[in-house]
Amino acid sequence: MAQSTFSTHVGMVDILPDEVDKWQKLERIIHEEAKKFNFEEIRTPIMEQTELIARGVGQLTDIVSKEMFAFDRGDDHYVLRPECTAPVARAYVEHHLDQRGGSQNLYYIGPMFRAEKPQKGRQRQFHQFGAEIIGAADPAADVDIIAFMMSIYDRVGISNTTLKLNSVGDPESRKAYTQVLKDHFRPHLSEMSEVSQDRFEKNPLRILDSKEEEDQPFVEDAPVITDFLTDETAEHYSRVKELLTELDIPFEEDPYLVRGLDYYTRTAFELVSPDLGAQDALGGGGRYDLLIEEIGGQPTPAVGFAAGIERLFIACEELDIQLAEEEMLDVYIVTLGDEARKWGINHLPKLREAGLSASMDYIGRSMKSQMKDADRENARHVIIVGSHELEAGKFVLRNMKESEEEAFTFDEILERLTS
Ligand code: AMP
């Protein structure tokens, strides 16, 4: 085959027709579960103001400091959104969604962009589904967000997952903890990785996220944040755990689970799968009570999650889960000669109006090729039309699965196929 002149950018992939069924199936599952949990869909632009993402996600995060696809046009600074929590929060503030009353339960599905080094489970354009409950401080909201996320994996059939849970505290508890954590790491800094040395001043909590081997001995015996929680935050965390237990949602506490962003408060969680290899996180989220204020709104408690669609599909492959059934075409019209083609073109709309999926050959192929095409399209039935059939007013209806055929008038065919 000739080499194509153009290709996608590295880390960006086409979703080809053969793969699209599973995407549509998953999207249907997400919409159906969202309905059950009473979440409403929100669609925000692919591009946002760079400043929103910098402030919303945090200047010191890898996403903002290294991975943004950003460009300027005149005085405007654009960024391809790397995540959707900050955009949804912006929309909430910009459109005064609080005035709709109550908390806002919102969900989204769409592409996100991060200039990361591509590898299995890590792309530069990838897709997330996620949800936010904005305006509710109660631990029940944290648990509802987790239950909504889990319900989607349940429906798909991915069950051997672990839900990791932690509380990352509030600013007061975090201040005390950060100090103790720095005291713990300081004597060992010279033995630690460069990344961790860099994080030590900027965002010491992120050292706990380190995958570098040389950091592990110091991370393993680091103090834990749960020892520094204020009473109110400790009470919130206990209530989340109680509710999860009541709802039979298993979880594992991981006191080193941090979501490195400054606006995260209290609950943090991550859903991991042993089927994903190095990039083992299916999704994650937490409470971000400070974000809405950070981007110019009134102080508003909120909690959310985001999950990777490509990683969900990798887990499906590993577990041999077929998300989509094979698509079938109801009818394929095989035509022989010009008159038969005209008949076909006139009758396709009638089949479609009756609610059937129907197709035919448009490029004048032989009968044999048309039959092959019908097979490739997974046609349930074929209508064979030639001059003899046109004269008789009866057409051969072939049941492709049973390999049986019989001649009928078109009305009889319609009746048989729709009954
Ligand atoms: P985050 O927004 O970083 O918390 O990521 C939430 C989820 O999105 C992760 O658990 C992954 O499933 C998915 N994800 C994040 N970054 C990527 C990426 N570069 N490629 C594919 N999936 C990703």
Image (spheres, rainbow, N blue to C red):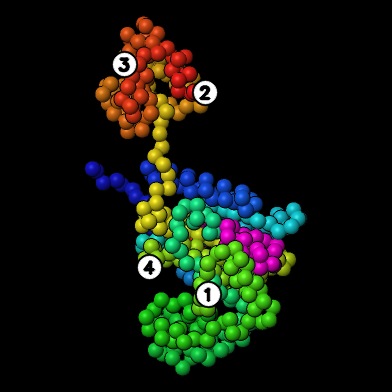
Cα distance in 3D space between marks 1 and 3: 68 Å
At mark 2, the secondary structure is: helix
**The quarter of the displayed image where residue 125 is located:** bottom left
| Amino acid at the residue labelled 2 | Glu
Q: Are marks 1 and 3 in contact (CB under 8 Å)?
A: no
Of the image marks 3 and 4, the number of the one nearer the N terminus: 4
Cα distance in 3D space between marks 1 and 2: 56 Å
Disc 3 target residue: 336
Q: Nearer the viewer, mark 2 or mark 3?
A: 2
> Where's the N terminus, which quadrant?
top left
Confirm if mark 2 falls within 8 A of ligand 1: no
| Amino acid at the residue labelled 1 | Glu
Disc 4 target residue: 278
| Amino acid at the residue labelled 3 | Leu
- Find residue 270 and report its horizontal and vertical position in percent: 51, 67
- Find residue 265 and report its horizontal and vertical position in percent: 62, 73
Q: Which residues are magenta?
A: 125-148
Q: Please tell me how crowded label 1 is: few (under 14), some (14-19), or many (20+) other residues with Cα within 10 Å.
A: few
Residue at (76, 55) in percent of width and height: 101
Q: Tell which of 151 and 28 is nearer to you.
A: 151
Of the image marks 2 and 3, the number of the one nearer the N terminus: 3
**The quarter of the displayed image where residue 140 is located:** bottom right
At mark 4, the secondary structure is: loop
| Amino acid at the residue labelled 4 | Ala
Query: Which numbered marker is on residue 253?
Result: 1
Q: Is residue 134 magenta?
A: yes
Cα distance in 3D space between marks 2 and 3: 24 Å
Residue 75 at least partly seen:
no
Of the image marks 4 and 2, the number of the one nearer the N terminus: 4
